[in-house]
């Protein structure tokens, strides 16, 4: 009986590790890094934007179970706005 409980606990820990440990993906858009696990995704955005003064966009996007929870992308001032 005690051995079954230990096996169940080990299986639960392994499943949680698989669901929660992200793998980094580096995009070729100027420096964006996406940390993606099965349950969530965190994108640290640093992408090229030729229409901005600085030439790039910065920010963070957080998704849990495919739903966007947080998005803070600073698109900088466009040339057309000034």
Image (cartoon, grey):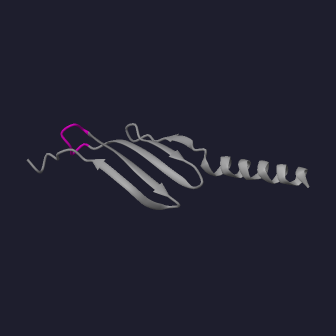
Residue 52 among magenta residues: yes
The main secondary structure of the magenta stretch is loop
Determine whether 49 is above or below 5 in the image: above
Q: Is residue 73 left or right of residue 20?
A: left
Q: Is residue 74 left or right of residue 40?
A: left
Residue 54 rendering spot, x and y as whole percentages: 22, 37
Q: Quadrant of residue 39?
A: bottom right
Residue beneath the point at 57% across and 44% down: 22
Residue 68 among magenta residues: no
Residue beneath the point at 71% across and 52% down: 15
Residue 45 rendering spot, x and y as whole percentages: 38, 44
Q: Quadrant of residue 68?
A: bottom left
Q: Is residue 52 left or right of residue 9?
A: left
How many numbered circles does the render carry? Answer: 0
Q: Is residue 39 left or right of residue 13?
A: left
Residue beneath the point at 43% across and 40% down: 28
Locate the N terminus by quadrant: bottom right
Determine whether 65 is above or below 81 in the image: below
Residue 82 rendering spot, x and y as whole percentages: 8, 47
Q: Nearer the viewer, residue 8 or 37?
A: 8
Residue 41 rendering spot, x and y as whole percentages: 50, 51
Residue beneath the point at 54% across and 40% down: 24
Q: Nearer the viewer, residue 59 or 29?
A: 59
Q: Which residues are magenta?
A: 50-55
Determine whether 72 is above or below 26 in the image: below
Q: Nearer the viewer, residue 2 or 21?
A: 2
């Amino acid at each position: 009986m005690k051995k079954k409980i230990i096996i169940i606990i080990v299986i639960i820990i392994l499943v949680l590790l698989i669901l929660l440990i992200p793998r980094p993906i580096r995009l070729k858009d100027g420096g964006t890094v996406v940390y993606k696990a099965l349950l969530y995704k965190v994108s640290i955005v640093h992408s090229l934007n030729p229409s901005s003064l600085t030439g790039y966009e910065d920010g963070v996007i957080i998704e849990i179970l495919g739903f966007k929870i947080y998005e803070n992308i600073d698109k900088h001032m466009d040339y057309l706005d000034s």
